[in-house]
Amino acid sequence: MLVCVDVGNTNIVVGIFQNDHLLSTFRLETKIHRTEDEYGIRLVESVKYHNLSPLDTTGIIIASVVPEVDATLEKAFTKYFGKQPLFVGPGLKTGIPIKLDQPKQLGSDLLVGAVAATSKYGHPCIIIDMGTAITLSVVNDKKEFLGGIIYPGIFTAYNSLVKNTSLLEAVKIKVPTNIIGRDTISSIQSGMIYGTVGAIEGMVKRICDEVGSMKVILTGGMARYIAPFVPDYIYDEDLLMDGLKIIYEKNQPEKA
């Protein structure tokens, strides 16, 4: 059983692979001050809920953009799962040359997404990951990571809007009936959905104008709301889980 972990600013997504099959995924809230035992017990309970045992773990790989929780998670997995996790970072084999001015600044989640996208769908490609932030990562026809765009996530942007605008109210994300809102809530929801779609399509067009036509792969927790409005894009909910599995396998000792 391979445990793949994607640590984001809002959630920790955990995927469980048995052989080549993704058996299940679950989410925990990312909390910097949570202890190793709090994380460990929650992880064990979640694994057991899916009728699995932590003792069946053969390997663990973690991609994290929240370094404050890395040591705690490492201790939690070592203590409760009996395995030392492998962290995505410098020195690991990925098969993706990084062509950035500051390669060490590349988020491990972006690299994992690029590995999965190129392995599953080919290159050149644009990977759009929609979470706390919306990131667009560009991989060229030489399978080189060129860079990308960081844009506010849907809730990040609208929470800030509501917080700083006294007459607006917080709303849940939902596709409105019409693009033209007839009240405050539907107007905000229209901006959430159609505004985000327009921004993404505009950024993709400008990238393609600059570097040429590319496949576009959409993933991340908020992507399911946007995917129906961009039918030419490939929607892959489990892209990062597949990328973590690929990187883990690339970095195992070759069998004699």
Image: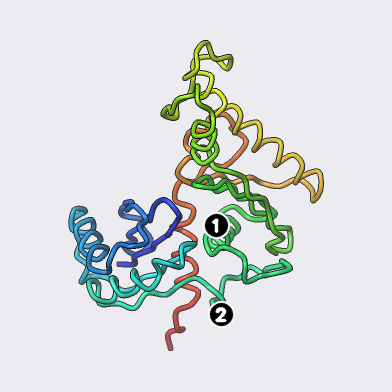
Q: Determine the residue positioned at 23% across, 59% down.
A: 42
Element type where label 1 sits in the image = helix
Q: Determine the residue positioned at 36% across, 56% down.
A: 22
Q: Earlier in the sequence, mark 1 or mark 2?
A: 2
Which quadrant is the C terminus positioned in?
bottom left
In the foreground, 115 or 19? 115
Q: Position of residue 49 (x, y in %)?
A: 18, 53
Give the alpha-carbon distance from disc 1 to disc 2, as whole Å.
Answer: 17 Å
Corner quadrant of residue 2: bottom left
Label drawn at residue 113? 1
- Relative to residue 215, is residue 166 depicted above or below? above
Q: Determine the residue positioned at 49% across, 46% down.
A: 131
Q: Position of residue 189 (x, y in %)?
A: 50, 24
Q: Residue furthest front?
A: 166
Q: Position of residue 129 (x, y in %)?
A: 55, 48
Left or right of 116 in this view: 36: left
Residue with the mark numbered 2: 91
Which quadrant is the N terminus positioned in?
bottom left
- Relative to residue 27, is residue 228 depicted above or below? above
In the foreground, 45 or 97? 45
Determine crowd level at label 2: few under 14, some 14-19, many 20+ residues with C-alpha closer than 10 A: few
Left or right of 242 in this view: 43: left
